Amino acid sequence: MADRPLLELEGITKRFPGVVANDDVHFELAKGEVHALLGENGAGKSTLMNILYGLYHPDEGEIRLNGETVRIDSPSRAIDLGIGMVHQHFMLIPVMTVAENIVLATEPHKGPFIDIAGAEKRVRELSEQFGLAVRPEARVESISVGQQQRAEILKALYRGAQILILDEPTAVLTPQEARELFDIIESLKAEGKSIVFITHKLNEVLEVADRITVLRRGKTIETVPREGATEQGLATLMVGREVLLRVDKPPAHPGDPVLSVTDLEVDDERGLPAVRGVSLEVRAGEIVGLAGVDGNGQSELVDAIAGLRKVRAGRIVVAGKDVAGASARESLDAGVGHIPEDRHLRGLVLDFTLAENLSLHDYRTAPESRFGWLYPRKMVAKARRILKEFDVRGGGPETPAASLSGGNQQKVVVAREVSRDPAILLAGQPTRGLDVGAIEFVHRRLVTERDEGRAILLVSFELEEVLSLSDRILVMFEGRIVGEYSPDVTEEELGIAMTGGGREQEAAA
Amino acid sequence: MTERERRPPETPGPAENAPDPEDAPRSFTESVGAWFGTAVGGIAIPVASTVLAFLVGGLVVAATGHNPLGAYKAIFEGTGLNPLSYISEDDRRGAWADLQQTLIIFTPLVLTAIAVAFAFRCGMFNIGGQGQYLVGVYAAVLVGTSLSGTPSFLHILIAIGASILAGVIWGGIAGILKATVGAHEVITTIMLNWIAIYGGQYLFELGGPLQGAQESIPRSDPVMDAVHLPAFPLSTGLQPLHIGVLVSIAALVVYTLLLNRTTLGYEVRAVGFNPEAARYGGISVGRSYFLALAIAGAFAGLAGSLDMLGWKYTVATNDIQISAVGFTGIAVALLGRNKAVGIFLAALLFAALQTGTSARQLDPAVFPPELAIHLSTLIQALIILFVATELLIVYIWGARKRLGFGGPARVQPELKA
Ligand SMILES: Nc1ncnc2c1ncn2[C@@H]1O[C@H](COP(=O)(O)OP(=O)(O)OP(=O)(O)O)[C@@H](O)[C@H]1O
Ligand SMILES: [Mg+2]
């Protein structure tokens, strides 16, 4: 009995129309173990975990908990069995406090009233026990993404989770927040909790996982211990071929400025200044990286260039045309392409088919439409070409975007923006949620685009990505550009600049 | 962080999603599963709601001491929809007259339902079908009682055009308010309904500007014969079937094409699904709101003119008060799931219920007509209640599930245990 794993998934098969998402998958979890689940986009990781959490029912296979076969037909059953899940997109109610969210549906009562003080006390105890710093009485909408994630973890623990599933928890975190999450994972492990951790970042896997299971196209490929695993080895296991983890790129040959921003000032939602007098230039044939901690005005800057946010003062010139204060349509027509940071908020209409999504900017022009009349077959033909070129898996032109895996959805957005041939491409977190193979592909594609004379402004919280792709790096802090660096700057130096400690306007190499 | 992923990882995508034809062909179970999923998500609920409503209605009939089956049979006979009625020479005339009546009621219901459905696809709840219908009525009366000497065909076109324009304006006002100051369409369209109702009272009341020549009756003059819509060649009876029914069926085709095959429809659907993504895609969200409500108003306004030019010919203040075509249209759209075929069937059901339970059709020995009218209202109300409850239940289940507690997960239908 003693060496029996806590949890065994045996021969799990799950079919969706046209796709076998899980094909005879085996997976085990020991008590007190952190087990990473790796695999390409669409490999079936989320599906497998959704099965464990009772959201999908397997077509075949068996789940054993402590050696006993269990049937998990709903999340509430999963919770009863001590299984908790934190989805990549949080399921919290924004207007309620952290404590209210956590105790929802299991509220402690004092007579007929909900005992909020008691709930807050219990939440505070839990958060101290596991080092999950978050204020129980804060409203969810007013706290950071990292704190929301902690609230989700607390919610699972509050309901007695012994097994915690984290689906791509670090995709939405800044590197600092990710570090804090790893500390939390360590303390959970020390308390005897078992954790399944899905990620595409191999360095994270090597840092926190005890064992690693790799899925490929729905099948279990191998389970390996952390000892002896390497990033390169894991990447090869996942993709089935050698992957280039570093971008090789020839030096840039920048041409004329395509985008020039002068003294730009933009406000955020609350009407407070977010961009305070930014001037920058991106020339044809170069990639400019915009580094910074989230919330320092990068998003507002990009939105303003894309015509999605009002400009208070300043100029934005795209290919010779002033688009400050222009509509999104005018910016698009002037040659702006934009990979938005959040694919679900903006990048995709999830209820549209892939063909419709891929025509989101071009549905008004021939050949997709003529005189206001749509030609769906033309849209489908175009979509088929693009989906193939960008290796989007899990569906064809007529598949609704909602049924693709997260990474494949991201590929659709990147494919649409890149294939429009914009003069300037604003790339916000372009590889968020992508697997190593897809990242390699997108990186290479961005470099090719650059070499063909496209101007690219890259916004990323991944310092590694910024460093390896950019020809110049601008650091943004509190709404201002506080420094310009050449890509051979060290991560440490950049990190200091991003928190406001950098030297002003260091000359680029 | 208010906008969450609307299809969280646990929610299966629509089951009808077609795999790429280049992929492996679907297995039989997959095809059946997909079909079943569509059926469950699509027609099963409306059908179940309808059946349930009739069952409850039957209990009520039984409670009044009558035989439910007999009552329903009599109601059905009175709708003109029973093919068997057309076999014998004797029954044929009566059945045909009933069918005409059903189709006359069917016509405006289809159009006011489209007015709800089109706005709905743009993410809005248009409660204003009634007001948009009424201003269409007024415009048709105004044109139909003036412009004498205009060639008939032209006169009809002008009258219909005026009604459509009136509906466009009525819907468009709500649209502009939503697009510019963000006024919620539910509030503004309800207010516009009242303005249309009281405006009509004022126009046609005794001494009102459009009150007719008969000074003692608060009613308009009848529209001129020249603007009467042509009737079907074989129509009989007091209220011959006018060609408006063809117009309403054509409107269903227009609705579907407009939504799915035009850039305007693309914009409307994109805004309806995800306004933020639509804005990012370069679509003017405000413009789409305006156009969607204006076009919705056009359909409802058209309904007003078809009723006036087709069979009512005149409008009295009393009619304005009791008319509910626009509101029934909401029910039709809801039951028909905003789909053309669904609207067609739902409108036919509601129209048949109204005809079948009208005093003229029912044998008092089988079921008293004065009760029957209420029975029809009762059944309609129950259908809406059940359809709406289902939406609520699904919503609550979805919400519970999204929050990770309780409620069975909605997953692919299980074909085997
Ligand atoms: N509800 C659904 N309906 C139809 N197909 C689905 C559904 N959910 C997932 N799939 C398909 O199942 C496969 C596995 O998807 P899953 O989301 O498990 O991938 P994943 O490993 O989590 O990928 P990613 O890293 O991109 O998130 C994909 O091909 C996807 O298109
Ligand atoms: Mg996933």
Image: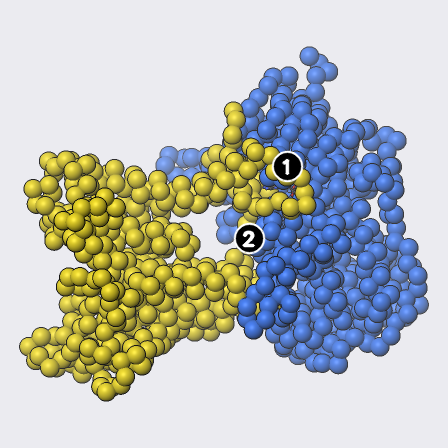
**Number of other residues with Cα within 10 Å of mark 1, as a class: few under 14, some 14 to 19, many 20 or more:** many
Left or right placement of residue B27 versus residue B410 in this view: right
Q: Which chain's colour is blue?
A: A
Label drawn at residue B132: none
Q: Residue shown at 64%/57% (left/top)?
A: A380
**Number of other residues with Cα within 10 Å of mark 2, as a class: few under 14, some 14 to 19, many 20 or more:** many
In percent of width and height, residue A192 lies at 68, 26
Left or right placement of residue B112 versus residue B410 in this view: left
**Within the image, what quadrant is residue A288 found in?**
bottom right
Q: Residue shown at 23%/74% (left/top)?
A: B228
In percent of width and height, residue B211 lies at 15, 79
For residue B309, above or below residue A40: below
For residue A170, above or below residue A356: above
Residue in the foreground of this view, choosing between A183 and A226: A226
For residue B350, above or below residue A224: below
The Cα atoms of the two marked residues, 1 and 2, are separated by: 20 Å
Q: The disc numbered 1 marks a residue on which chain? A: A
Task: Specify which label sits upstream in the sequence, 1 or 2.
Answer: 1
Q: Which chain's colour is yellow?
A: B
Left or right placement of residue B25 versus residue A495 in this view: left
Q: The disc numbered 2 marks a residue on which chain? A: A
The residue under label 1 is A47
* Amino acid type of the residue that numbered disc 1 sits on in the rendered structure: Thr
Left or right placement of residue B306 versus residue A258 in this view: left
